[in-house]
Amino acid sequence: MSHLITDWHPEDPQFWRTQGRRVARRNLWISIPALFLAFAIWQVWSVTVINLPNIGFNFTANQLFWLTAVPALSGATCRAFYAFMVPIFGGRKWTTLSTASLLLPALGLGFAVRDPNTSYATMLLLALPCGFGGGNFSSSMANISFFYPKAEKGTALGLNAGLGNLGVSAVQFLIPLVITGAVLGAPAGGPQIWHGAHGSKEIWLQNAGFMWVPLILLSAGAAWFGMNDLACAKASFRDQAVIFKRKHNWIMCVLYLGTFGSFLGFSAGFPMLIKTQFPHIDPVQYAYLGPLIGAFARPNGGWLADKIKSGALITQIVFLGTVLGIIGVLLCLPDDSGEGGHFWGFFASFMLLFALTGLGNGSTFRQIPVIFLDIHQRRVARGEVDEEQAVRDANKESAAVVGFTGAFAAFGGFFIPKSYGTLIDLTGHVTAALWCFIAFYAACCLINWWYYLRKNAEAKC
């Protein structure tokens, strides 16, 4: 099999039925587990930090929130570069390389947590390369967008991102299980003694990193031998940099920050938020459910947007519902003295938030290719380019925008948990952060309605 495809026309119905769909699906189903592992590594610290104080690491709550937030910060930075890598290197080559790079943070975490004398600075440095997993999202989504026609992009991107997002839930569900025994044998090292309110026990916290190593190797191999590079997707950075002049690139960055950025931030901060606001609740029993719901909701957001041919309408419903969800969280928090509060109301409100942000992740990614195809079809109407060139340019720009908006939105994974930690340090509570979130989501409602949803919207989608 030739890994480089020189003839690719997904908008041609005959080509798509006879050749295109089969190839596109193969690349999608190899991409999904690679992205799953990327998300798992990106969020591995969100659940690992809960156990650090119990095995002898003397870190404050704010320092622990930093460890959960730093991978999001580095991931957002990586995404800004990864967004442009597929047209330069090719989807197959870049997926292989970026997946293999996850070995560094997985091994680093595994070795570091075996010794409680590891310094906080060292732990921060080891948390940084977990951002490689975050960067993979932008390149993965950009790559898959090239393979599918406009009518199926929302569903395909929703599946890639939604099933990939399951890595967040998986890491929060599996790590509490695998650290309870020497499941990786003697090479992983001996146990640590975990001290809690109800006694002591042995755990193998290094398994939180080492367990992913064989899976990463398998996924990188599958990408190398099973994926394709598309000649039509080739573009230099200069060719792609035109998106920085596109107003709608920046508008969609803001909207995607409100959907995917919120999903990341809520996922990273949820376990520690439960632990600080409801100390009598074990967060590992519940924290994985939110990312799980959000991940399953994401493909539905893309599918619904394709079905009703309006990503903007789904996005609008998402932001309105998110405001209500945050209000629900506020009503259920303990008071300033730590008294009262209603955990199950708090939990239900967050499950609503995860579901809504998952839907919004899918719907916003349906909006992007529609917006940019419309921009280039106007060039056809003006006689500047032919239809084929317009579709090719639209695909390249929308792929770059998909990646870049993902980079911008990833900062939400940093700011949300960091805002929790900072405000707990300053005020002892997180209420002010939640009110800021409400104001931001209300602004997103107005922006989405004005540019994409109202009757005479500039780019109705």
Image: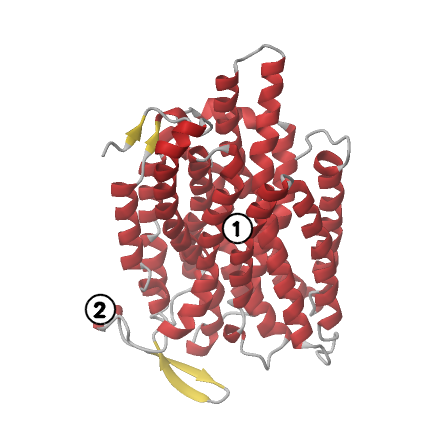
How far is mark 2 from mark 1, CA to CA? 39 Å
Please name the residue shown 51% across and 23% down the image. Answer: 391
Asked if labels 1 and 2 touch by Cβ distance under 8 angstroms, the answer is no
Of all residues shown, which one is farthest toward the bottom? 199
Q: Which mark is residue 410?
A: none
Left-right relation of 387 to 178: right
Precedes in sequence: disc 2 or disc 1: 2
Q: Which residue carries the number 1 mark?
A: 299
Secondary structure at numbered mark 2? helix
User: In this orientation, which residue lies closer to the viewer: 222 or 209?
Assistant: 222
Is any atom of residue 252 visible in this view?
yes
Amino acid under label 1?
Pro
Look at 61% across and 39% down and name the residue there: 253
Image quadrant where one finds the C terminus: top right
Q: Foreground residue, 297 or 99?
A: 297
| Residue 34 percent location from the top left of the image | 37, 50
Residue 144 left/right relative to 183: right
Can you give x and y, in whole percent of width and height, for residue 156 in the image? 47, 43
Mark 1 residue element: helix
Q: Position of residue 276 (x, y in %)?
A: 61, 73
Dot 1, how many residues are within 10 Å of its Cα: few (below 14), some (14-19), or many (20+)?
many
Left or right: 444 as drawn, with respect to 84 = right
Q: Quadrant of residue 14?
A: top left
Q: Nearer the viewer, mark 2 or mark 1?
A: 1
Residue 187, which numbered label? 2
